[in-house]
Amino acid sequence: MSTNEQSERVTLGQRIKETRDYLGFSQDEVGEVLGISRSAVSLMESGQRKTDALELQRLAKLFERPISFFTGEDLAMESRNVAILARMAGKLEPSDLEELRKFAEYLEARAQAKGKGKNG
């Protein structure tokens, strides 16, 4: 395997893991949707296992992200911003997290109403 291919697998795995963690899915839950074991999900996230096209399609649907988010065609900044927001949210009180969730839902609804939703 080429160095570039390994690097792409690692990057894809990191995006999968970051998104799974951010959305609160366990490896078991993701594995169930993909039809693979938890250990296979772990190998995928570490870049040690190939992710086939059908798995990528199912991940995109589960995580409500475009496939381009996982393949790197999306802006790398989005992934960075998600990680930053997740770290910040981890420091909030439960009541503040609920307010943040409600605000995020409001922003998403507003964007969709304007026709600018990421998945719309």
Image: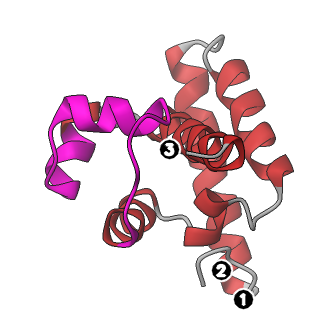
Q: What element carries label 3?
A: helix
Q: Name the residue under label 3.
A: 16
Q: What residue type is labelled 1?
A: Gly
Q: Residue 12, position in %: x, y? A: 57, 47
Q: Residue 80, position in %: x, y? A: 79, 38
* Label 1 with label 2: CB-CB less than 8 Å: yes
Give the camera-side residue of 28 and 119. 28
Q: Name the residue under label 2.
A: 112
Quadrant containing the C terminus is: bottom right
Which disc is residue 115 wearing? 1
In the image, which is nearer the foreground, mark 3 or mark 1? 3
* Of the image marks 3 and 1, the number of the one nearer the N terminus: 3
Quadrant containing the N terminus is: top right
Choose top left, top right, bottom left or bottom right for residue 114.
Answer: bottom right
Q: How crowded is mark 2: few (under 14 residues within 10 Å), some or many (20 or more)?
A: some
Q: Which amino acid does label 2 sit on?
A: Gln
- Residues rendered magenta in the picture: 29-53
Q: What residue type is labelled 3?
A: Ile
Kindly tell me whether residue 66 is visible in this rendering: no
Instruction: Look at the image and say whether residue 45 sits in the magenta stretch.
Output: yes
Magenta part, dominant SS: helix
